[in-house]
Image (cartoon, helix red, strand yellow):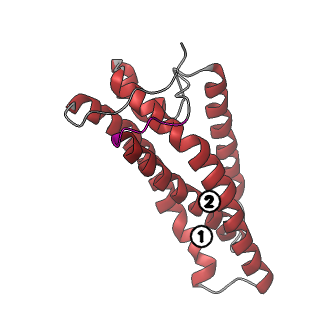
Amino acid sequence: MRAEVPIEPSGVSELFVFAWGTTGVMALLGQAVYRLTPQALDPLVHGTLTPFQAVLYIAWVLFAGYTEGYRAFQGRFSPRVVARAAYLAKHREPWHVALAPLFCMSFFHATRRGLIAAWTVTLLVVIAVLVVRQLPQPWRGIVDGGVVVGLTWGLVAIAANAIQVFRGVEPRVSNEVPV
């Protein structure tokens, strides 16, 4: 089922719900970018990278930008967040609205496939965070550099998709709301 568009700027409650869902997700991603950026920049600022590590840093940032930023965020996650926010703006169940960022990330009221994907990715991210925190610099900075690029790409992709909804362009992915 696709989201109903466009969000009417004159519909204050629709606009509020849409904004709460999208900006709530963006705040979660932004908080991670804010927290990880110093770790990512540390090896660059302090010049602790060997030539091999510098090449690895660049390669990892490019790889993460493509896989995490372009393919995962721009291709799947960000359009789905916006599609679900647009759906929620039109179908305002009180507890869905209260938890709009989580709704938009498909943690509940989603298809079985959407729920499995959301919870599995979250579990894998938590495990990765626990592992990466144990890495010494510059290795942690190398990993976090790619993560910061991917998350920033995701933030921009959510904003770009949200702008498209306001222009009347229907989200190009399913909102994965159960029928």
- Do tag 2 and tag 1 residues touch (Cβ < 8 Å)? yes
Instruction: Pick the residue in front: 72 or 120.
Output: 72
The percent position of residue 50, horizontal first and vertical second, equals 76, 85
The amino acid type of the residue labelled 2 equals Val
Magenta-highlighted stretch: main secondary structure? loop
Binning the other alpha carbons within 10 Å of mark 1 as few (below 14), some (14 to 19) or many (20 upward) gives: many
Instruction: Pick the residue in front: 25 or 126.
Output: 25
Q: To which quarter of the image does residue 139 belong?
A: bottom right
Q: What's the mark number on residue 147?
A: 2
Lateral position of residue 95 relative to residue 73, left or right:
left
Q: Residue at x 61, y 55 (%)?
A: 69
Is residue 99 in sight in this rendering?
A: no
SS assignment at label 1: helix
Q: Residue at x 45, y 27 (%)?
A: 3
Looking at the image, which residue sits at the far front?
Answer: 168
The amino acid type of the residue labelled 1 equals Ala
Looking at the image, which residue sits at the far top?
Answer: 179
For the magenta stretch, what is the residue range?
166-172
Lateral position of residue 67 relative to residue 1, left or right:
right
